[in-house]
């Protein structure tokens, strides 16, 4: 995928405990299939906490999952945390739309929403 192409699904991770973007988090995008999950792409959040080149620029309707390696992130910071991973499963209902799935993160809590 070229650097100028944005994937159909993007994310932005903010570390709410530090009030900063969460850089360096590994993120995987998968699609649900009859046999389980199929990997579509991986990325690492940039200095602004964003992953824009995460997978294909177009996806079909279906169920998808983002997996964030949050334990590794907090370990690197020397911070104890409760969740070694955060997985967000969501439904892509319109293949023509872009889906942005932000993650607000702290060592002992997280939240997400459908972004724009």
Image: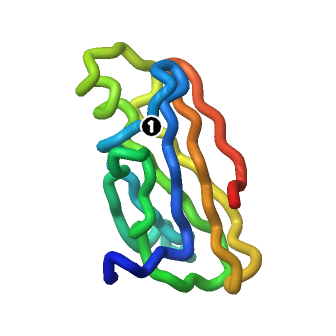
The percent position of residue 103, horizontal first and vertical second, equals 57, 42
Q: Callout 1: helix, strand or loop?
A: strand
Q: Residue 82: x percent and y percent? A: 46, 20
Residue at (70%, 66%) from the top-left corner? 91
Would residue 67 appear left or right of 96 to someone viewing this image?
A: left
Q: Quadrant of residue 24?
A: top left
Q: Is residue 83 left or right of residue 102?
A: left
Residue that numbered label 1 is attached to:
21
Please give the name of the residue rendered at 26% of the width and 16% of the height, measured from the top-left corner: 78
37 vs 45: above or below: below
Quadrant where the N terminus is found in the figure: bottom left
Q: Position of residue 93 (x, y in %)?
A: 75, 75
- 7, 109: nearer the viewer: 7
Q: Would residue 39 be visible to someone looking at this image?
A: no
Q: Quadrant of residue 73?
A: top left
Query: Compared to 57, does 37 lie above or below?
Result: above
Q: Residue at x 35, y 30 (%)?
A: 71
Q: Looking at the image, is 6 positioned above or below residue 27?
A: below
């Amino acid at each position: 995928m070229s650097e100028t192409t944005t994937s159909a699904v993007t994310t932005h991770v903010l570390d709410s405990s530090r009030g900063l973007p969460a850089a360096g988090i590994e993120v995987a995008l998968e699609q649900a299939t009859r046999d389980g999950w199929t990997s579509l792409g991986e990325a690492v959040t940039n200095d602004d906490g964003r992953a824009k080149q995460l997978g294909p620029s177009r996806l079909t309707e279906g169920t998808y999952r983002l997996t964030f390696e949050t334990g590794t992130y907090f370990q690197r910071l020397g911070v104890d945390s409760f969740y070694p991973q955060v997985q967000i499963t969501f439904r892509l209902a319109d293949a023509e739309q872009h889906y942005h799935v932000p993650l607000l993160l702290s060592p002992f809590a997280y939240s997400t929403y459908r972004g724009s």
